[in-house]
Image: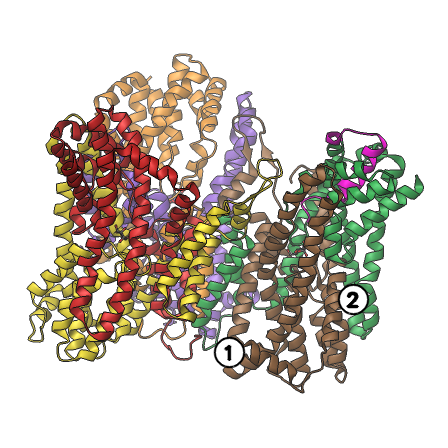
Chain colours: A green, B orange, C red, D yellow, E purple, F brown
Amino acid sequence: MVIKAVLVGLLYWIAMGRANYFFSFAFRKPVVLGVFIGLVFGDVKTGLIYGATIQLMYMGGIEAGGNIPSDQGLAACIAIPAAIINSLDPAASVAIAVPFGVLGVLINNLRRTINSFYNTKADSFVEKGEYDKLSTFSFILPWLTNGVLYFTPVFIATLFGPSVVQAFIKVIPEWFMNGLANAGGMLPALGFALTLVVMGRKQYIPFFVLGFFFHAIAGFSMLTGAVIALCIALIVSMFKQNEEGELT
Amino acid sequence: MVIKAVLVGLLYWIAMGRANYFFSFAFRKPVVLGVFIGLVFGDVKTGLIYGATIQLMYMGGIEAGGNIPSDQGLAACIAIPAAIINSLDPAASVAIAVPFGVLGVLINNLRRTINSFYNTKADSFVEKGEYDKLSTFSFILPWLTNGVLYFTPVFIATLFGPSVVQAFIKVIPEWFMNGLANAGGMLPALGFALTLVVMGRKQYIPFFVLGFFFHAIAGFSMLTGAVIALCIALIVSMFKQNEEGELT
Amino acid sequence: MVIKAVLVGLLYWIAMGRANYFFSFAFRKPVVLGVFIGLVFGDVKTGLIYGATIQLMYMGGIEAGGNIPSDQGLAACIAIPAAIINSLDPAASVAIAVPFGVLGVLINNLRRTINSFYNTKADSFVEKGEYDKLSTFSFILPWLTNGVLYFTPVFIATLFGPSVVQAFIKVIPEWFMNGLANAGGMLPALGFALTLVVMGRKQYIPFFVLGFFFHAIAGFSMLTGAVIALCIALIVSMFKQNEEGELT
Amino acid sequence: MSQIGEKAVEQKSNIVTRIDLLKAWWKWCLAVEVPVSFDRMQALAFGYSLNKVLRKVYKDNPEELKEAMKRHTSMFNTNCDWGSLIHGIIISLEEQRALGNENITPEIIQSLKIGLMGPLAGIGDSVDQGIVATIPLAIFVPMALNGSVIAAFVPALIYLAWSYGYSWFLMKKGYSLGKNAVLEILHSGKIKKVIDIASIVGLFMIGCLSSSFVAFKTAAVFNAGTSSEVVLQDILDGMLPKILPFALVMGMYLYITKKGPKYLRIIVYTMLLALALTFFGII
Amino acid sequence: MSQIGEKAVEQKSNIVTRIDLLKAWWKWCLAVEVPVSFDRMQALAFGYSLNKVLRKVYKDNPEELKEAMKRHTSMFNTNCDWGSLIHGIIISLEEQRALGNENITPEIIQSLKIGLMGPLAGIGDSVDQGIVATIPLAIFVPMALNGSVIAAFVPALIYLAWSYGYSWFLMKKGYSLGKNAVLEILHSGKIKKVIDIASIVGLFMIGCLSSSFVAFKTAAVFNAGTSSEVVLQDILDGMLPKILPFALVMGMYLYITKKGPKYLRIIVYTMLLALALTFFGII
Amino acid sequence: MSQIGEKAVEQKSNIVTRIDLLKAWWKWCLAVEVPVSFDRMQALAFGYSLNKVLRKVYKDNPEELKEAMKRHTSMFNTNCDWGSLIHGIIISLEEQRALGNENITPEIIQSLKIGLMGPLAGIGDSVDQGIVATIPLAIFVPMALNGSVIAAFVPALIYLAWSYGYSWFLMKKGYSLGKNAVLEILHSGKIKKVIDIASIVGLFMIGCLSSSFVAFKTAAVFNAGTSSEVVLQDILDGMLPKILPFALVMGMYLYITKKGPKYLRIIVYTMLLALALTFFGII
Ligand SMILES: OC[C@H]1O[C@H](O)[C@@H](O)[C@@H](O)[C@@H]1O
Ligand SMILES: OC[C@H]1O[C@H](O)[C@@H](O)[C@@H](O)[C@@H]1O
Ligand SMILES: OC[C@H]1O[C@H](O)[C@@H](O)[C@@H](O)[C@@H]1O
């Protein structure tokens, strides 16, 4: 069982560790993971059925801005082994999958929090001109570090069964879990605030505010926003000859 | 009973006469008036209960632009005495309150119509440089004059009971009441038209029209409007160097 | 019967051939056509009732941009004769009318397709300076040509009864009818694309795009669009002094 | 202002008589919707209406005449009734131009024509078809249902009286406005502004009109009827609302810009495309 | 910035004392909603508040005083509490102007007043009436229902403490901002920009306010109750949303522009119109 | 245009080879989502991708190199696939700059990068995730449910083929566009315009993105469950939609502007705040 647990843990790391993004994105689909988990447990067919069943819950859903609506990979890597071991009904496997799909969102938040550390490190390497270290701290180290985050829960869950994991989760107070989820909702603000700083054009902040509230009122898609933004920018730029003496 | 009627009439004048706006705003709440009307009728507790019950109907509701969604003060000052005298069920007091809450809107319209007279007077005092008279016509006189409007109906209603008032109201044709209410809806236009005149920048009228129809289409809050307006104004002002030769 | 069929066919041509637009617009109303078709069949009263009944289905509905929501004229000219001949219940006449109201939309599409030919011809007459021919190809010829389109179906339907026409329509595959209808939805794009070309101000295309997507998002009326457009144009033109050196 | 205008109309420099105006108006009413096509809409009707007037106005200048004829057989569409305002304005502008006022460039004429056609279509359709043609129907059709033949005609008569009266009024108004506007605008040097405003309004309105009148939706559904059904149109709407009509207009625009004005070809291609897409269940 | 400002306040060039400010503030609180009318709203209350201060400030210049009095009895409306910021700013601007700073034109004063009144009304009403007056009610009324007299008073007390405290704070803030703004803006030559921005915001907000607060709808229905019922308001909405309120405001605007400031007449006409239209079931 | 571009690429003035481009692209694909953090998102992955290229390009100029490294480890986020266009453009711009073209300022590079990342994220996410990844799933998952292992892999294979192919195509396209754009823009003197447009688009998009992706709502309810229940979020929505997310972004922005780039601290504070607010039931 330990080997199986290791293998499933590695599958999840491949799926959500995100090295080689396109591949991991394709690989993390429950219907794909189902085949491989089935292989690990010696029953490809059953794994496939569970995987495909779980997949049905995650057909649409766009991951944008680094946020994931739910973690299909974790859902699959916890629910499929449990279902195979206990010969569950496919519907029951879905019932197990759902909460872990949500839990995975927290892991992703944790990951993005930890990764901030590498950013800080990176700054000092740039300062010192140590560009090889910069490289190391940009990919391999975060990938390995984050591997722990991805491997561990699935390894434990497969080894002890999801019921133990669920019991453990129940120990953590609900407000704490919700608080982390809320933090995950709030933290993307940092990236945007930072971009405003990086842009550095104070007199253009009104365009940011307009974009914000147009979107808040009308709720259009990002592409629609881009088209509107481009039109406004083109119109505005028609009248922008003499730059000097601007309100700053 | 006359004294009680006088007292309740005065309470209503304090509440809606609006001298010392913050105070009158706080005082006109049925839950507050209930205590004082209770005091007048020697039963604070009962007054409080009626007041609090009526208050429940008027929890939200913003008075903006001089318009009141309903007159909680009149509702309270008519319904609470009636309820105390007849030992009504609290729910029944609400039933009495509602139509007078609406009637009070008409009194407010009447008040604002009459006050126009003081504006006209004020102009002539400014013209003649009689600034003391200007003062008198700006506060004390309108306050006293309007006092009649506020004192009378409540005094009568408390003296003869609301049924007499209601009978009187029934004599007035419905179309007339509705017509006054409709006039109240239309007249705020005057204030806005006047502001357009006062602003005096004909070439900026398109901003007024844009504001009107953006709001008419999307129906956002005033604060949202202000934020959008500020963004537009800041953007536009970036390109506004050479003022001369404008379209007027 | 042939004479009656000819007369009804001519009525429809008058109604939808559109020479003298205001007149044809007024004339094509089923309630009006009902009287005349009644006259043809010697029973004005009955024709009127059928016409008025069918009219009820077409009370609103704006024809804009050359598109007709449905062809009330065809509906009336097919359904009323059929109803008179078979002494149908008014409700049954409505049932016959509906599909022909839709079919008429296709005839209108066909008409607008054919008319393109006259445009091409017109260009060559302008080129050669043959302005009398231009006139002929601008009104009388299209009117006569299109007359065939309008006269024929109604003539046949009245002669053979609508059941024969319906049988014929059933022979045409449904996808073909739908395809023509879809083409009718798509082809107005040409008129607008052409206007963009005619306008010839590439740097103003963003206004077109803004208009398109504002409308697509908020779905306001054309008049609202015009008011917004005018405001934007007035605001923009305030800042448009020095034209040279524009982005083209 | 209207006094100045009327004086201006009386000036010696007139070619167009009231009768000319009346004839142009009548021809517009007669032809307006008859030669309507997908590509140029009421273009030929506009040209038909102005044909004689232009020939009179430019009788000494065949080159200018040809240019004017080209201008006025180019794409046009508006409300038949309210749009007469445009005819009036354009006739007076062409007249001024023929009389030597070179400030009235083809660009002004074109941009005013296109800038006005959209808004006048919007307001005209609402009022004429939404109010004048509808409300009398609502009142009189019930009477007609009760057998009154007169009631059957009243809505039509109201509509006719309004349309003929108002469109002729607007034609005259437009003509005198054109005179005024010309004088005034020339004196104030605001021509560029007027063109700008008209062009912006025109383009914005073409945008609104395109969004409103071009119908093009996909019906494609993957895995239909199951719980994991994917409706392609929903995905497209999630990307950009009305992306297909937009692509269609822009596609045609680019095609014309690059390959020239091959309208018949575009119509045929579009019809074939529509038939094919419908056949395969894509739209 | 606020340091510079405080220094500026300390300059020799002061006429307005803190006591003057306090009195002006108190009179505003006292009068604000009392003389409210449909035509000029809180205009007289604004004038009442500034009456004494203006007489002190312009005591050597009766002409300027009259002009200032006119300015400050013209149309005004804002949130009573947050609006004190405007009083503070305006008093300091008038003071500077009286002290000879001719760069502070009546136009600046007027446009700032009108530009600020809308946004401050918007935010003030939301916060004061939406939050400060509402949430304590939600908390304490249930206790009052259980018989607690104290609970009946708590929301009122919270509201009073907030309103008096905050409006006095803003009055002082406005006064010092006025001083700063004046110095800063004059030095940077950005006065025109500030006026522009304030005017645009003001006009846009008047648009929003008009759309929001003017109620005017037709109730006319043709052929009511039948299947061919035509609701006139629906047709109007289909043309232009809120077309009647818009026409009303624009109509009054044009009337005033053309016939002068005959407000009482407009009020009477409007009331008669409203009564007549209601009588005939049109609104 | 693309012909000119290709010629330009062939010029002697090349440092970056196709192999360099390929490596940069591959590293981008490899790393893109791995070092993603809340503060700088894909910044390190962008830097990782360009690390070698920049060192080659600026090998004689360590100061410029450091500046470039700073630029390209600053905040960045886009769609992994479509975003390759940006890499291509940026690499060619850095190359031109290294070759001495001083017109290509850091500001241009930065504003193009940020101006493009939003729109490309918008379109890329819709197409890649909304269409390319979704529709094959809709088609093949039902087959997989019937036991077909091959069907389980088909959607993945389609997605992989598309993503790798298209992102490499865009990388090359971006590189040649960069060359063209540089030449063209420099010649026409339109650089400022391009920066302006890119900056405006960028900022507007950041606004849209913030509104869309920052989730921050209060759950506070006063007097819950009774008929006089007051939901705080409703009041806030009535004031300004999404006021809390807006305040959060602006708050962080001001904090960074004033206190410098202390991102870790902001993250920790935000998490503590979120936990505390959740604990007290406020969010
Ligand atoms: O939204 C752009 C981009 O943001 C993040 O980097 C991820 O969520 C990607 O999947 C997405 O494409
Ligand atoms: O809307 C601003 C303001 O308008 C009027 O003066 C009153 O309704 C106030 O209560 C309100 O604050
Ligand atoms: O929309 C303007 C105009 O378009 C076409 O010409 C016809 O549909 C008319 O009825 C309509 O008035």
Which residue is at a point 41% across and 64% down the rendered structure image?
D253
What is the tally of numbered marks visible in this picture? Answer: 2
Secondary structure under tag 2 reads helix
Residue A248 versus residue B209: which sits nearer the camera? B209
For residue A77: magenta? yes
Residue D234 versus residue A152: which sits nearer the camera? D234
**Dot 2 and dot 1 within a common chain:** no
Residue D64 versus residue F240: which sits nearer the camera? D64
Which of the labelled discs sits on residue A122, or is there none? 2
Q: Is residue C246 left or right of residue B204?
A: right
Q: Could you tell me the amino acid type at mark 2?
A: Ala
Q: Disc 2 versus disc 1: distance between alpha carbons?
A: 35 Å
Q: Could you tell me the amino acid type at mark 1?
A: Lys
Residue B26 visible to the viewer: yes
Ligand 2 is in which quadrant of the figure?
top left
- Image coordinates for residue D112, horizontal then vertical, percent: 27, 66
Which residue is at a point 84% across and 69% down the rendered structure image?
A133
Give the residue at mark 1: F190
Secondary structure under tag 1 reads loop
Residue E222 versus residue D214: which sits nearer the camera? D214
Q: Residues within 10 Å of mark 2 (few under 14, many from 20)?
A: many
| Magenta stretch secondary structure, dominant | helix
- Image coordinates for residue F72, horizontal then vertical, percent: 70, 69
Give the quadrant of residue C136. Answer: bottom left
Q: Which residues are magenta?
A: A68-92
Which of the labelled discs sits on residue B166, or is there none? none
Give the quadrant of residue A3. Answer: top right
Q: Is residue E194 above or below residue B45?
A: below
Q: Is residue F22 above or below residue C69?
A: below
Residue E225 visible to the viewer: no
